Amino acid sequence: MDFGAIDFTNAVTIANLICIFVSMILGTVVLLTAIQMRVHNSRMAWFIAAICIVLGGLMFQLSNTQIYSRIFYAMVPPIFGLYFIETERVEGQKWDGLFWTTIQSLVALLVFIFMVFNGDEFFVYLVFLAQYLIVIIMLIFSSKDIVASIYFLIGSMFPVISALIGMADPKLHFMGLGIIMMFLMIFFGYQMDMERALLNKQVELSENKVSLLMEQIHPHFIYNSLQQIALLCDEDADKVKPAIFNFSAYLRKNFEALTNEKMIPFSQEMEHVDAYVALSQILPSRNFNVKKDFQITDFYLPALVIQPLVENAIYYGIGMSTEGDDILIQTKEENGFVVIRVVDDGHGKQTELSTQKKHKSVGTKNVKTRLKILCDGELSLNKSPEGTEAMIKIPKNKTLKPEK
């Protein structure tokens, strides 16, 4: 009896079992963490699917059903290709990610053939090696930024090493551990990307607040308002007190909006709009009416996104037109979105100055930025001979009351 061979066989068995249990623990932790993340998109869905497939392969390996475990491991690179597509693809971009996934699927088919008709694990591990070499080639040639994909590259080395170990000794089954380590590295990279994106959003939001302050608190508007209130003292003293209250409310709402990073109730935003409209109506300008059609009011939105649109409608819609005197503010729920429309019927020849056009563009840019950062909302403008429509669309699930 060769006790040395028995000891070696036992050592290999123990090493395989340790790798399986360590891999299952690490994979389960990553899977549960990924599931509990707040951001669930198609990119994360493919990541979770790949982890589940690896865990399935580990379960078959634990039950010593090697043929099924190898087949499960072979399915991971095609799923990884789909994950990589969602990571690297720019919206609307035609990309070659599907090409890589197709190649990986064909290579995975070789594993099925070898396991069913051949059974030689050396060739199976050789195919595994080819799969992850293709992954490395895909990363090098198709990454938008190879430096940003460094975690992908480092992680892909683990299954490459595991495949080489399997080729050297087919009794050492470390492929599951190698794949889990790859996804562990990728998950760390994903978390760092998320933190970096969050930091960039915070910086962008802070910069946007500064420009919003400069754009929103107009010295000429404040001057004209105070001057008109002073004239009311002689012309209509009864309107002075309400005008001062409206002026105070307008300033207070502006400064509150600039310090508020959370979503606010729609009713609170409308208080700001009403104060601005009331203040605008005392200034020497063409008369206008504001109509409201609120089909939904119980929702939250970023502060200071409707008031700038109403301002544009007053001064650059009906104010710069020879006809029209109505502004409509409408809210409704449509296809899973909360839709807010600000429509004016100003039409005819418009005579905007270049400074006024710049003022409008800055205002709408601020609104777009705040909507995108705070609630993934969108702003669209539609100009026609009948007037201008500004439409805000916010996903319904993003308009719920924010957590404290």
Image (cartoon, helix red, strand yellow):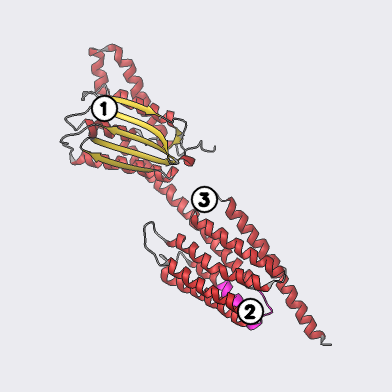
The numbered mark, 1 or 3, whose residue comes first in the sequence reads 3
Question: Which residue range is magenta in the image?
Answer: 157-173
Q: Circle 2 — which element?
A: helix
Q: In this view, does 310 lie above or below 361?
A: above
* Location of mark 2 (residue): 166
Residue furthest to the right = 1
Q: Where is residue 330 in the image (x, y as percent from the top left)?
A: 36, 31
The quadrant the C terminus occupies is top right
Near-viewer residue (243 or 274): 274
Confirm or deny contact between disc 3 and disc 2 (CB under 8 A): no
Confirm or deny contact between disc 2 and disc 1 (CB under 8 A): no
The numbered mark, 2 or 1, whose residue comes first in the sequence reads 2
Residue 256 in which image quadrant: top left
Report, in whole angstroms, how far the alpha carbon at label 2 lies from the one at label 1: 76 Å
Report, in whole angstroms, how far the alpha carbon at label 1 lies from the one at label 3: 42 Å
The numbered disc on residue 326 is 1
The quadrant the N terminus occupies is bottom right
Q: Can residue 191 be seen in this view?
A: no
The numbered disc on residue 39 is 3
Residue furthest to the bottom = 1
Q: Where is residue 172 in the image (x, y as percent from the top left)?
A: 68, 77
Residue 267 in which image quadrant: top left
Q: Is residue 171 magenta?
A: yes
Which class describes the residues within 10 Å of circle 1: few (<14), some (14-19), or many (20+)? some
Which class describes the residues within 10 Å of circle 3: few (<14), some (14-19), or many (20+)? few
Mark 2 residue type: Gly
Report, in whole angstroms, how far the alpha carbon at label 3 lies from the one at label 2: 37 Å
